[in-house]
Image: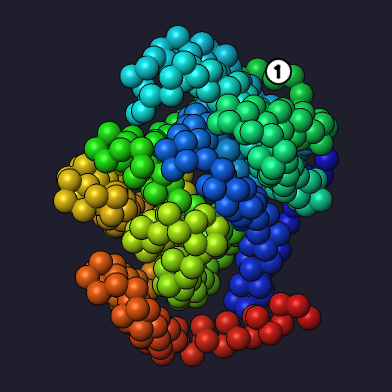
């Protein structure tokens, strides 16, 4: 164990800080992004192997597993990340870590049986005949192992053991993908068999992760850290739960109002949007520790503003580029039978961009330790999203799901940014990046209309023009001379 961690961002230039953030994004964020990208390896096989309805059901249960995991983590990862560096001794940190893990496992032991007992046919949006409860049982069995994997990855990241981190994070997803591919190619894979394979893989890497972190684990001597972590983590727990339940609710509304065919289309469009999620995940994974370690520096806000403008420029361009490529990607990764899914890719990708922007501008809430403020914006977003999704679906079909999610995220970013300013005022340069995001949203939604009315040929020409407008606007009006120099210098010197 090593507790001697110094703030290497203190007293260095803005360029050095941005290079550090970029490298951290590549190592830790990149690993998280690649983990998600591996799912794209199995996506084409599964989409072709199963019917649209079956694939929609598999996607539902996979999302359910992720939701339940976040529910039982309940913000403990955020709490440990916030307090880990406030203690210098290995013994204090060991107790902090061990008590956090105990909270998560105790919650699963207490509430897990009630979750199983309370499960009934009504909790599922569609019927899966007699296999329904078997599928739910497999998902429920995965949760303790998902908890241990999540815990291990975070601890390895906080203790800077990059090799072990990569073994657990990438090893888990790559092994899972290899097994799924083998099952699909060699056996007549069913939804149940795929979930069983995921269960077996999670068991192995859960125990491997605990083995790597065994030196940090100890028997909790008391509950000294429990109250502090619960108080800080509870708001983030509710936030994570609400954020995680939204994909579940979206899929439930699709199945209830439109049917399982549309559920499959929505699942495919979400997988394409996952490519945007790779960029967002890489950035968000590195941003949190970077921002917290830097916030006591007097010139931190200058670095924050540079990071935000550079990220928004890259993310807006990536969102439009992915939208432009969506029809081809769907044909290649899935099949032409999912071609209609391309219609909702842009609203889903720009929603991810907005989510990442909110993660930056609401950093004041984390710095002030007033985590409960996050609840206000998340609850507001949750309500607006559900109402908008339910209403817009009646008029726009599955496009209404994506539009509703986008409106909810706009509300969340706006409110959370305002609350963060009240909790910890900072000199954000809002105008440049808001202008670029607004232009990108207007162009992207216009392209959706063009695709519906005029078809793909005219849409391709219009989309090309839109990408050029956003790139020129971002480069000339959003990025100042300093940001342009930082971008070119940072990329040029990164690999020296």
Vertical order, 307 against 50 (above or below)? below
State the residue at coordinates (25%, 67%).
Answer: 452
User: How many marks can you see?
Assistant: 1
Taking the spot 60% from the left edge, 86% from the top edge, the residue there is 488
Q: Is residue 89 left or right of residue 420?
A: right
Residue placed most toward the observer, 436 or 126: 126
Local packing at callout 1 (Cα closer than 10 Å; few below 14, some 14-19, many 20+) is: few
Residue 423 relative to residue 495: left or right:
left
> Quadrant of the rendered structure where residue 95 is?
top right
Q: Looking at the image, which is closer to me, 165 or 403?
A: 403
Name the foreground residue: 473 vs 16. Answer: 473
Q: Is residue 427 left or right of 145 when viewed as pictured?
A: left
* Quarter in which the N terminus is drawn: top right
Q: Is residue 387 above or below residue 163?
A: above
Q: Position of residue 106 (x, y in %)?
A: 58, 17
Look at the picture and state if 150 lies above or below 24.
above
| Residue 427 position in % (x across, y down) | 38, 69
| Residue at (50% x, 35% y) in the render | 58
- At which x and y percent is residue 18? 61, 72
Front residue of this view, candidates 114 and 333? 333
What is the x, y in percent for residue 189? 62, 33
Can residue 311 be seen in the rendering of this structure?
yes
Q: Is residue 315 visible?
A: no
Residue identifier under label 1: 221
Circle 1 sits in a helix, a strand or a loop, which is it?
loop
* Residue plotted at (17% across, 46% down): 394
**Colouring convention used in this rendered image of the protein:** rainbow
């Amino acid at each position: 164990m090593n507790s001697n961690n110094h703030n290497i961002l203190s007293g260095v230039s803005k360029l050095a800080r941005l290079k550090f953030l970029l490298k951290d994004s590549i190592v830790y964020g990149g690993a998280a992004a690649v983990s998600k990208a591996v799912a794209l390896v199995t996506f084409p096989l599964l989409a072709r192997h199963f019917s649209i309805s079956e694939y929609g059901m598999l996607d539902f249960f996979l999302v359910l597993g992720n939701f339940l995991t976040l529910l039982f983590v309940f913000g403990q990862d955020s709490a440990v990340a916030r307090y880990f560096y406030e203690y210098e001794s290995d013994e204090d940190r060991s107790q902090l870590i061990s008590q956090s893990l105990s909270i998560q496992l105790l919650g699963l032991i207490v509430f897990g049986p009630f979750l199983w007992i309370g499960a009934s046919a009504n909790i599922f949006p569609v019927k899966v005949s007699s296999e329904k409860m078997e599928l739910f049982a497999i998902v429920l069995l995965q949760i303790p192992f998902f908890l241990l994997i999540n815990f291990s990855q975070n601890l390895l990241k906080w203790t800077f053991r990059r090799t072990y981190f990569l073994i657990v994070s990438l090893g888990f997803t790559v092994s899972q993908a290899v097994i799924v591919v083998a099952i699909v190619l060699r056996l007549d894979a069913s939804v149940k068999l795929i979930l069983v394979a995921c269960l077996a893989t999670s068991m192995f890497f859960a125990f491997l992760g605990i083995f790597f972190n065994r030196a940090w684990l100890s028997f909790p001597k008391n509950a000294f850290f429990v109250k502090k972590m619960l108080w800080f983590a509870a708001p983030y727990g509710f936030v994570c739960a609400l954020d995680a339940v939204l994909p579940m609710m979206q899929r439930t509304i699709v199945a209830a109002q439109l049917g399982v065919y549309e559920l499959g289309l929505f699942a495919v469009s979400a997988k394409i949007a996952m490519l945007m999620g790779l960029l967002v995940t890489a950035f968000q994974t590195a941003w949190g520790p970077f921002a917290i370690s830097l916030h006591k520096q007097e010139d931190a806000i200058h670095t924050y503003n540079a990071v935000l403008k550079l990220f928004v420029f890259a993310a807006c361009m990536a969102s439009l580029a992915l939208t432009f490529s969506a029809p081809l990607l769907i044909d290649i990764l899935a099949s032409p039978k999912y071609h209609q899914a391309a219609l909702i890719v842009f609203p889903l990708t720009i929603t991810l961009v907005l989510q990442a922007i909110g993660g930056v501008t609401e950093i004041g809430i984390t710095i002030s330790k007033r985590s409960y403020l996050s609840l206000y914006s998340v609850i507001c977003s949750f309500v607006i999203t559900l109402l908008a999704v339910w209403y817009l679906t009646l008029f726009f079909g599955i496009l209404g799901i994506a539009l509703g999610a986008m409106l909810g995220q706009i509300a969340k970013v706006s409110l959370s940014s305002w609350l963060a300013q009240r909790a910890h005022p900072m000199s954000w340069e809002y105008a440049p990046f808001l202008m670029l995001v607004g232009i990108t949203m207007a162009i992207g939604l216009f392209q959706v209309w063009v695709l519906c009315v005029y078809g793909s040929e005219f849409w391709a020409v219009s989309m090309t023009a839109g990408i050029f407008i956003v790139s020129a606007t971002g480069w000339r009006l959003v990025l100042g001379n300093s940001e342009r120099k930082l971008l070119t210098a940072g990329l040029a010197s990164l690999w020296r």
